[in-house]
Amino acid sequence: MDLNYTDEQKAFRAEVRALLADKLPTRLSDKVAGGKRLTKADYEEWHAILNARGWLAGNWPEQFGGTGWDAVQRHIFEEETTAAHAPRIVPFGLAMLGPVLQKFGNDAQKAQYLPRILNGDDWWCQGYSEPGAGSDLASVKATAVRDGDHYIVNGQKTWTTLGQYANMIFCLVRTSKDGKPQEGISFLLIDMDTPGIEVRPIVLLDGEPEVNEVFFDNVRVPVENLVGEENKGWTYAKYLLTHERTNIAGVGFARAGLASLKRIAGLEQDGDRKLIENPLFAAKIAQVEIDLMAMATTNMRIVAAAAGGQAPGAESSMLKIKGTQIRQEINALTRQAVGVYAMPFVSEALDEGVNAEPVGPAYAMPATQAYFNNRKLSIYGGSSEVQRTIISKAILEL
Amino acid sequence: MDLNYTDEQKAFRAEVRALLADKLPTRLSDKVAGGKRLTKADYEEWHAILNARGWLAGNWPEQFGGTGWDAVQRHIFEEETTAAHAPRIVPFGLAMLGPVLQKFGNDAQKAQYLPRILNGDDWWCQGYSEPGAGSDLASVKATAVRDGDHYIVNGQKTWTTLGQYANMIFCLVRTSKDGKPQEGISFLLIDMDTPGIEVRPIVLLDGEPEVNEVFFDNVRVPVENLVGEENKGWTYAKYLLTHERTNIAGVGFARAGLASLKRIAGLEQDGDRKLIENPLFAAKIAQVEIDLMAMATTNMRIVAAAAGGQAPGAESSMLKIKGTQIRQEINALTRQAVGVYAMPFVSEALDEGVNAEPVGPAYAMPATQAYFNNRKLSIYGGSSEVQRTIISKAILEL
Amino acid sequence: MNFDLTDERQMLQDGLRRYLRETVTADLLASATGSDIGQSEVLWNGLAEMGVIGALFTEDQGGFGGAGFDLALVFEELGRVGAFEPLLEMGVLAGGLLAELGQEGIVEDIIGGTVRVAFAHAEPASRYDLSHVDATATASGDGWTLTGRKSVVIALPFATHVLISARTGGSTGDTSVISLFLLPVDAVSFRDYPLNGGGRAGELDLDGVSVPKAALIGSEGNAWDALERANARAVTAISAEALGLMESIRTLTTEYLQTRQQFGRPIGKFQALQHRMADVLIEIEQARSAVINLAGHLEADRVTRERHVSATKNLIGRVGRLVVEESIQMHGGIGMTEEYALAHLVKRLTMIDHRFGDTDYHLERFIRLSAA
Amino acid sequence: MNFDLTDERQMLQDGLRRYLRETVTADLLASATGSDIGQSEVLWNGLAEMGVIGALFTEDQGGFGGAGFDLALVFEELGRVGAFEPLLEMGVLAGGLLAELGQEGIVEDIIGGTVRVAFAHAEPASRYDLSHVDATATASGDGWTLTGRKSVVIALPFATHVLISARTGGSTGDTSVISLFLLPVDAVSFRDYPLNGGGRAGELDLDGVSVPKAALIGSEGNAWDALERANARAVTAISAEALGLMESIRTLTTEYLQTRQQFGRPIGKFQALQHRMADVLIEIEQARSAVINLAGHLEADRVTRERHVSATKNLIGRVGRLVVEESIQMHGGIGMTEEYALAHLVKRLTMIDHRFGDTDYHLERFIRLSAA
């Protein structure tokens, strides 16, 4: 038993901190810290900085231009970049598709797509969810019918995050109706510029068009864009989902959120004291901090096990539920902290360079938005209800 | 809309208060307030006092020697007697069996049993639950087989409250295995002195033998002890359950408990202040008081509707759940309030006249016992889980 | 004891509910927020014609209601449809204060809907403290000079007048020096903006605005008692609005649970959701009782009344958060989208905890009042 | 970073778990509480022979462990079987203090199990305040006179000696005047009684007990730092015991859900219970992490250590209540009965929130320490 990082791990952390000190543009970290809108160019700028250092693909093996980091190194990188308010690494190409191509793609696909992901030539988005399917991913209705050396794709995908920026989409499509729903699914790579594709934004509770609907009307996709075997897509999709689960606990986000909550509560006047001196509010902050201290260690236990080669199973369901509860509670307390100024909604104030003064403190409106936006944490990537069922089956054997 | 009692109701309340001032023995109210053990004789003494005034049977019509009170009057009586720390009226004969006999019993049964209930000649107990049945009451296994002018009863009942004091028991027994489980049940009145009956105490978490197992080994019961028709017992049982639900919210108990909690928190030293001045503890007390203020009004709304002739349906499920949550929270806070002295367990100290000094303040040990004992509130009389299912079916139509 | 509506109130409820169902569409709400005034003239005038504003005033004030249960009835109905016409600000607060301070003339026009008075009281540093008035009014020549800032003045762009609180002496927090001044809205300058949950508000900048003597409402420094009473009535109104929002959210969510299929059955068949929805229902019943308690104690002695104010607002805040979060969760993805009907209702319900004191503020206040 | 047990600890855990499974029966626990001493000599001696007491001390102290993770390991195992032998009071507290204050001789006998020292520190008015010492020791002739009351001195009837804290000057709450005195138990008079959760304790009445000079342990008025460190180790131990209790309660409850049939199927098939049990499991994992955090920071600087003390005890208290109440509820009636195995475990777990500071006490303390 030893809760401390090894000297090697501490040295690595120092390297990460050095990079952030030297290379993370203040313009970007200010936007992240201030809850401002990030543009496509902002993400691309940060990706390029990391790529130049060879640190963009934290979960890729070195042979493909990745870092070859173990779980603990990835955790340290996450922890430090989040604490420094770096933009998040857009996961669709790097965290999700990359590993799938590396394991199941053919050499041509690896050669064509992996470098373009690293160099930012392609922006990928995810075509998994469909309207009405919810957490039942296997109920894929979008079809791909073979026609010569093309597939003809028809149907609709939804909740496609940042699809408005993407030029490529990886999709689950139904290529067979025989057998169990899982058995007729294939994994296709589709160029968003192909005729017949339409992207429509979905505005979320916080007023932001973060996700999209993507419509496919007789879209012709070359057969060489099929990953692995036809009708075996479900296997690849599940493999991808396990990779999506890295950093599922969101410890770094929770810590950054807690720090910002304390800062705000230290600024807000509450009668003749600061809000952070209000015993009831201080108790709520302390409670969530205590929960976070424990959850971070649960997370490290699972990270350490993963670094030791154990694949995290239902444990990550526990992490997702608890991590989500903690982050949503921090969001709720921050919204509560900003008081009456939670009400004004001045969308322009989130854009850089526009001088629309915020109403009240600049932190107020982003606090309200974050509260509404992060309700999604307990819904997407397998809702908390789905996770509880996984736990009761896999661990409790109920 | 008017939240106040009418003048008639206020006058009635004054009458009740007068009776309590004149006739409730301090010896009894001290025992109730102090969480001491009540003996059989204590209950009988209080019953006799109320009977002398004609106020023992609050939910019986006058023709049977009852009060003929409406729901509001019954509520006022409950409220006042509980606030005065009067012993509770033992419900098995008065609240439960009485109404069943009045509606379904024959003239001989009414003539024989109802007066004996009022005069305290019989102490009834309830033979409903069976081992392993839990909330599934209809799964009655105890059998009654007709043999000439007797039934031969075999089987086991459990959770029989105060069965150790009873000389009579009303039982659900299976007289037919045909049809649905509900269809073969009969309602029998059994003399506890009949050969073949054995009563074994069950000690609960708080160390008290409050409930019992009752075993029946070829017990001969005269056929005239059958209530209503053979195999129609389920109808009578359900009718009884609705009567059991009067005062299901336990507003009076909650108010008495809250008052005692505040008193204790005002006595307990917490550093350089009293516990009630501890902002976190004060907040918990205030929270439960606010919930109680609302729940009491929910209760009055349903009482008023009942007085207006509406039979409470799934609403009483809501009251049972919320009332239970509030009472159990008050119990938990009171246990927390007594601090280290929650630990000593000196059973003798609960008996009258024994001079076993309590360890620490006299209120400490009863607080711990009440916490453990009242865990039953969310289990018996239809668990909170069963009540939620009733609500989701009956009100939400899910 | 009686929990039934009088015939008059029953008629008002039926009529109002029918009118709002027909009138308040998603488009109306969206275009109202989108408009410069942040409100719907049509809806405002319709409510005035129905006499809904009058229901907020007693007969001596020229209305035909004004009791706590009248406020509760009207605002529960407004809440059910997510309406955000400023009946609370212009009727209960500004109107109520003007009526109590004997301004019959203008109150008649308020009830008629032709005069619309915004209420400018809260300030950037006041958070939820009703007694915090930093703005000052100093006598100058034959009038007053107002200086200070007023924040989140709701419906200011829709107002014809504005009622402003200011200190005529003493120091911040001193309740014996608070006075009220009534100005035509074009006498002041402000910046306005849209609000989460609908409507628009303004930040009011008073840098030495000169107003005539007659602008002072009531006598100098004597507004506090009326202010606290009006605040109690406002909390009654907004709590009832919250209850209406909860009822509509409950209906939406229950229907969704009944119809939405997943894993081959309606999700309402999953026991975990059934039991959680049952708990939500129980808490909404608690909220209804809390509103009744407050509405029924508005005329009680001050401590009793204010204990109910804080008890009710605290409970409404807690139940509101539960209802918002559980309804979004049970809807899943669709519950996250702006265009679905739930979005407007949950945002509006969430914002109610940011007005007139939040859950914690009133819990602490309840403790103080109970100790007193 | 490494969360695996060393080989030595793994061996200790395996051996101890096996021994306790075989030895600690319901009968043993019942007869121990029923006995005059309130403990089981057999179990105590068995643990001593296994060297379990020694595992609580460092090698320089004559043991072979003594680190936070040694305490956590031992007490989690004791918790799993609901044992209540006073290893915490006599090993971690009295023993730990005597060891730190350089009493090698007696510590050797404590490790051997032949000397059993109760720890008398808490007082009727101290609640959870470690610094509250009202009892006084005044120099008299060639010794000391002890006066005061000590409450709920656990395992006093089982003790051969008692270690008593008293002030040698100053006033209550003054940490610079706290001294410790070691007495043979027959030098003091007390009333003893059984405890919820098992075992016996005593109320110690010191009305002018004369003790020799040599009874003073360490130097006069210098016990505080050692006392606070020992308290931190005691909180580690009792939190680990709570974790062990939670694990056994979880196992009992899960088995019950799997086997108990109602409405024609195992109740564990009902989704509402599945999801609640999943939440219980998640919180128990939180408790395990909290114990690891504290065990791993016992040697850190004071503020860091004490922040973890309060964080862990607070979380253990909250999770403990959840585990107790949910496990009883999911069992239904049988969970209410004294004779079923759950009863002893939930009572013991409940009582843990009544020792060394409860949930609220440590939440407030965590806030104070974080602000410092």
Image (tube, coloured by chain):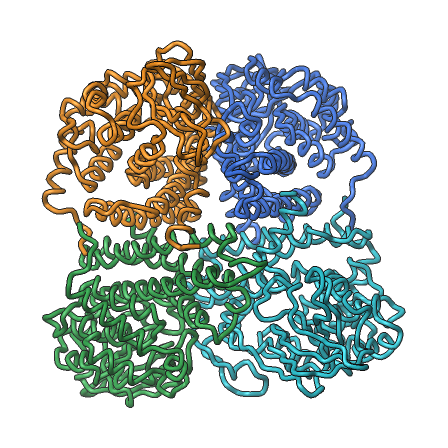
Chain colours: A orange, B cyan, C blue, D green
Say whether residue D231 is left or right of residue D124: left
Residue C60 visible to the viewer: no
Q: Residue furthest top?
A: A195
Note whether B329 is above or below A84 in the view shown. Answer: below
Note whether C328 is above or below D319 in the view shown. Answer: above
Q: Position of residue D120 (x, y in %)?
A: 31, 77
Say whether residue D332 is left or right of residue D2: right
Q: Position of residue B242 (x, y in %)?
A: 73, 60
Q: How many numbered circles are shown?
A: 0
Q: Position of residue A300 (x, y in %)?
A: 25, 47
Q: Residue at x 60, y 64 (%)?
A: B380
Q: Residue at x 39, y 63 (%)?
A: D251
In the foreground, A248 or A158: A158
Quadrant of the image occupied by residue A111: top left
Residue B338 visible to the viewer: yes
Quadrant of the image occupied by residue A72: top left
Say whether residue C8 is left or right of residue B314: right
Q: Residue at x 81, y 63 (%)?
A: B12
In the foreground, D280 or C206: D280
Say whether residue A390 is left or right of residue B147: left
Q: Position of residue A347 (x, y in %)?
A: 43, 19
In the foreground, D29 or A139: A139
Quadrant of the image occupied by residue C265: top right
Q: Residue furthest bottom?
A: D186
